[in-house]
Amino acid sequence: MAEQPDRYSEDEWDDVLGGERLTDEEKEQAWQRFERRHWPGRQAFWRNTAALLAAVLTLSALAWTAFHLHTHQQNIPETVTVEPTNAMPSAAAVEPIVFENAPLETILDTLSRHYGFTVSYRNAGAKARRLYFTWDRTMTEDEAIALFNNFESFSLTLSNDILEVE
């Protein structure tokens, strides 16, 4: 019946509806009751909007925190403690020092204390270059400098107890 209402007479409709006829005003009131019960109103819209905004802000805060924690952890300098030595120990008694992801400045400061030279930087960007380097303290300063000169991004030159980094 609902698909083709014009095929049925008024009497047939009365039988289906139970003989009950509604006025236009009653129809409007029934429709308003139905809307209040089943139709999401403005309250639902604002509630959904607030929930969506809270979700976006939470995800943004999590992404920001993860990014900054990751970059902060990469910028933490590695500390290496080296005791200054006065006499050259034998090769068997000295363990090599391993610098893992340490700035070139930290490595060269350690070597300068051991060998007694001063470091001068012509290229300021080279100070922050991070390296993985194993240093055998029984090496001479010329051998250590030769190892560093294998890197392509900078070069070291020693003259008159001044190590120049270019």
Image (cartoon, grey):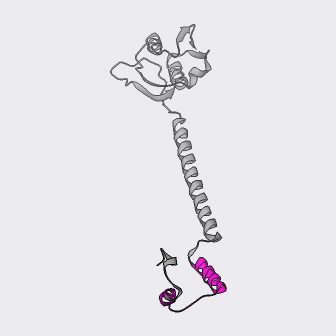
Closer-to-camera residue (66/51) = 51
As drawn, 65 above or below 117: below
Give the residues drawn in magenta, as a range: 12-37
State which quadrant residue 72 falls in. Answer: top right
Closer-to-camera residue (2/120) = 2
Count of numbered circles on the image: 0
State which quadrant residue 100 falls in. Answer: top left
Closer-to-camera residue (133/130) = 130
Please provide percent x and percent y for residue 104.
52, 23
**29 part of magenta stretch:** yes
**Residue at x 48%, y 77% (from the top left corner):** 2
Please provide percent x and percent y for residue 29.
64, 84
**111 part of magenta stretch:** no
In which quadrant is the C terminus drawn? Answer: top right
Q: Residue furthest bottom?
A: 19
**Residue at x 44%, y 18% (from the top left corner):** 87
**Residue at x 55%, y 35% (from the top left corner):** 75
Which secondary structure type mostly characterizes the magenta part of the structure?
helix
